[in-house]
Image: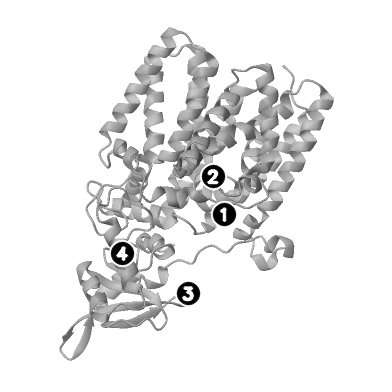
Amino acid sequence: MRTAPRPAAVAAQAAAAVVVLLLLLVIVRLPWAGDLGMHAATVQRLRHDLVDPGNPLVDADTPSPYYSPWMLVLGCVARVSGLSVFVVLRLAALAGLGLLVTGVWRYVRTLTGHRAAPALALLSLLFLWGTALFKWSGFYGLSSLALTVSYPSLFALALAFHLWAWLARAVRSGAGWGVWSGLGTLWAVILLCHQFSGVVASLGAVATVLAARPGRQVWLRLGGGAAVGLAVLALWPYYDFFALFGARDGLEAVHRPLYEDLLGRYWLVLLGVVALGVRAGRDRWDPLVLFFVLGVAVVAVGGVSGHYSWGRALPAALIPAQLAAAVEVCEAGRRGVRAGWAWVLGVALVLGAWTQAGTVGYVVPPRDLPEAVAEKYRRPWAGYHWMTRWVRYGDVVMAREGRPARQIPAYGAYTVAPGYPDFFLPDEGRRERAVRRYFAAGTPGEERREILREYGVRWVVAGVGHRGVGLREVARGPEGQVLYAVVSEPVRGVVAEAGWVRSPAERGAACAHPCRP
């Protein structure tokens, strides 16, 4: 078997090491955007009650798909160690990144023995995208990964690479029932941790098995492993996994943007599609080719049928193309062809890296970056640690939908409406309407007070000058946000506000808040 020239392998490994180091430094910063607050809230609920944590975002006793095996582990770590949930999420990010790097290495080793291939594959996964910046949970471009490295989606995707590698070896070696039971359990854990990444993992697993064209005995053992996995899914106590198949309302509108600007976001991946065509010419049962076909089929059906959440399966089309581009550099037949592939892939990776260069701003202050790089930097969200001096664990906060509802629960409070569609919350629509009605310009004061009473609201987060009967300004935060206390009853000549007038001991406990980043 040919081996890649040693200097090329060393260069690829060095570049991959630099990128991993950058991500490690990003983890120290843990920039905040997207769903980080919701995952922090999940850890927070589990650290307080491992058995019956309730809804992680609103004050309701409902199950939640956020309570996955991985989040249960993190909740136990937070409970035993007493560490801040943000420190625990940093530890989760380290674990997820380590699993991703080792998983890519193991899986690529099932495709080729070339020393440069694993490093090139990692670089392709991070940079071979497009020149329109795109960030989304479960999508692993460098700029997206920097913001989602602590998410369960990364953990699940990292486990998927290990699943494919283990499965490929099991099919080839004729593994016993114990191995197949372990594979079924791992498959179930991935699905429980992040359902969309679980779909990607499942498509990759199907492609791996079909490519091997196994005999009857392997199919029987595969069926046994699948049965074990289904049993794990059915027995998971925190939520009904199979009920999620009926979840559609709210998800399609959220995911429709996944089908926008596909060329701008992914045109560099076309190099990988060409590589897949070359591989298909050599072997129509190639696992990457089958994986790609399955991924494209699912995404295409989702787009045509209006099931836009199926767009979350896009990594099932991207991963095989990106890996094919990396592997083809090492496996092309003639030296001149290999050199041509290397140059084209190198240019594509540079273009992709330049598009995502703003990620460096999470490590280096943007003012110290070259102007061209600083312009690509996007400032992360500001947190709500400024209000933890007053807002206690379990307090209900009236806040607008969107960013506030996705962030405030991270600090232990609840919001009236969840920050993300919640299939298991029966009154989700009513809560959303209540929030919109409360903040509507023409809503009468008494109606606003009734909404606050109905949901047990102690605090309101709104802009400067928000007019509301029975509110008192308590603190001001960034971006013009103000924390208002909800006034309750006059007590001994002073105005007592829910959660605002406290003893010195209570104030000290609030200041030592365990959720500060």
Residue that label 1 marks: 26
Which residue: 74% across, 46% down? 350
In the image, which is nearer the foreground, mark 3 or mark 2?
Answer: 2
Dot 3: element: helix
Crowdedness of circle 3 by 10 Å Cα count: few (<14), some, many (20+)? few
SS type, badge 1: helix
Q: Position of residue 55 (x, y in %)?
A: 28, 53
Instruction: Determine crowd level at label 4: few under 14, some 14-19, many 20+ residues with C-alpha closer than 10 A.
Output: few
**Left or right placement of residue 338 versus residue 226 in this view:** right
From what the image shows, is residue 443 above or below residue 163? below
Which percent across, then down, holds residue 335?
A: 82, 24
Q: Which mark is residue 478?
A: 3
Give the residue at mark 4.
Answer: 433
Earlier sequence position, callout 4 versus callout 3: 4
Amino acid identity at mark 2: Phe
**The label number, if any, that marks residue 139 in the structure image:** 2
Between the C-alphas of marks 3 and 2, the distance is 29 Å
- Within 10 angstroms of label 1, few (less than 14), some, or many (20 or more) residues? many
Quadrant (top left, top right, bottom left, bottom right) of the C terminus: bottom left
Question: Measured along the vertical axis of the image, is residue 10 above or below residue 173?
Answer: below
Closest to the observer, 279 or 10: 279
Q: Are marks 2 and 4 in contact (CB under 8 Å)?
A: no
Percent coordinates x, y for residue 457 in the rendering: 25, 70
Per the model, the C-alpha gap separating discs 3 and 1 is: 23 Å
